[in-house]
Structures are given as C-alpha cells and as structure tokens.
Image (cartoon, helix red, strand yellow):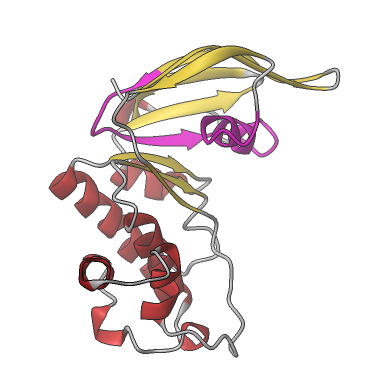
Amino acid sequence: MILEVTNLTMKFDNKEIFKDLNFKLEAGSMTTLLGPNGTGKTTLINILMNLLSPTSGSFKFADNVKLGYVPQFRNIDVEYPLSIKSFVGLNAPTFKNKQVRADIQQELEEVNLSAIQNTRMGEASGGQKQRAYLAQALLDKPNMIILDEATASLDPVAKEELMQLIQHLNQKHQMTVLFVTHDLPLAKKYMKEYLYLNHGRIEQGKMSEFEGDYE
C-alpha cells in the first residue's frame, strides 16, 4: 500500500466539496483520477501534496514515498533563454558536481531529450517542454508521480509520447502513477485503475470496467 485515504472531507466556508472519501492505492499502480469539472479533483491533489488541509479525515503515504509532480502544460515564452538541459537542472543543487551532472544527463535520456538538450526551451515544441517538466520532477528520484492534467493542451502525438514515457517509468522503475485527466480515451489506453470523483463521492475500480457518466 502506497497511499490510504480515510474519510477525507473538504469544505470551503459552507460549501462541501467532497465528503468521506475512502480509497487506497497500491505501490506500482497506474490510476487515473476522473470526474467532471468542479468536483474537487484539484482540491484532492492539493490536499495530498500538503498544499491544503482537509476539513476532516486523513491520508497516509507509505514511509518511503517520494512524490514527483508534473503540472498542466504551461507555455514558455519563445524568448526564454535557458536550454532544455539548463531548465531541467533548475531542480538540482546550484553547485552541480559530477554526480548531479550525471543525474541530469540520465533524466534527459530517460525522457528522450538528450539529443536536443542544448535547444532553447523557448524554441522547443509543447511536447518537448512538457517532457522537460517531467525530467525536472524525475531529478528528485520519486517513486510516485502525480500528473495534474499534464497532457491538456498537447497535440495528440505529444500526448502519446508523454504517456508512453509514463508507462515506461511504471514498468521499468515500478513508479506509482496518479493521472488526473479529462481525456478518457487516453486514460483507458494507459491506466489500469480509476478513481471517479463526482457529487462529493468517490468510486474506485478497474479502468477496463469504467462506465461513469463522465460529463
């Protein structure tokens, strides 16, 4: 067990976002968090990342968990001066010794960016930029990664490239994945389990059996 959520409830003022959420994630699982807009998916992620405190209830990660996080695609201005390699290195110590430089190189290779590592981030495609964000997250050597609408705004090819990388990380490194998305076909293709959040309640099951009324 890598995460256990127990009776998690969240209210803002008098508005109840969700109540008594209970679910567990197994280590090495590939789970998508689904649900219509406004049901509290982002709130739930913010609680799990300790950015918000729940009104009541609790959650507990396994003792050895190290979280990585990849946000929704944020475009970077074309004039942005840093190279892809330097951008990835922003998540490393300022003093980059031999081991740190090797780690940066390893993650660039892991996300298939080593060949263009000297390209300016501002000149990279949307998919390349998002893979650079993923490489940044991987520098911390996480064993669980949260993708928060990370494929939104990407073109179909870039979405597939990113998800194939996530699948590779799961299969090669047994990385636990929690993927927040509205892209049901993509979730069905790559995820094994689902969490469906709607009307303040959560449902869990096998992705192959998902029949939720999505919108």
Locate residue 98 relative to residue 196 in the image: left or right.
left
Which residue is drawn at the image coordinates 66% and 20% (left, top)?
A: 199
Which residue is drawn at the image coordinates 28% and 20% (left, top)?
A: 1
The span shown in magenta is 24-52
Q: Is residue 198 visible?
A: yes
Q: How far across and down, in percent of the image, does residue 171 sit?
A: 16, 46
* Residue that protrudes farthest toward the right in the picture: 14
Q: How far across and down, in percent of the image, does residue 188 sit?
A: 35, 42
- Indicate yes or no whether the magenta region holds residue 91: no
- Where the C terminus falls, by quadrant? top right
Q: Nearer the viewer, residue 175 or 137?
A: 137
Q: How far across and down, in percent of the image, does residue 122 sit?
A: 52, 85
Query: Looking at the picture, does residue 45 appear above or below residue 54?
Result: below
Q: How far across and down, in percent of the image, does residue 204 sit?
A: 41, 20
Quadrant of the rendered structure where residue 142 is? top left
Q: Nearer the viewer, residue 210 or 149?
A: 149
Query: Looking at the picture, does residue 38 appear above or below residue 182?
Result: above
Query: Looking at the picture, does residue 154 appear above or below residue 24?
Result: below
Quadrant of the rendered structure where residue 21 is? top right
- Indicate yes or no whether the magenta region holds residue 32: yes
Locate residue 131 relative to residue 202 in the image: left or right.
left
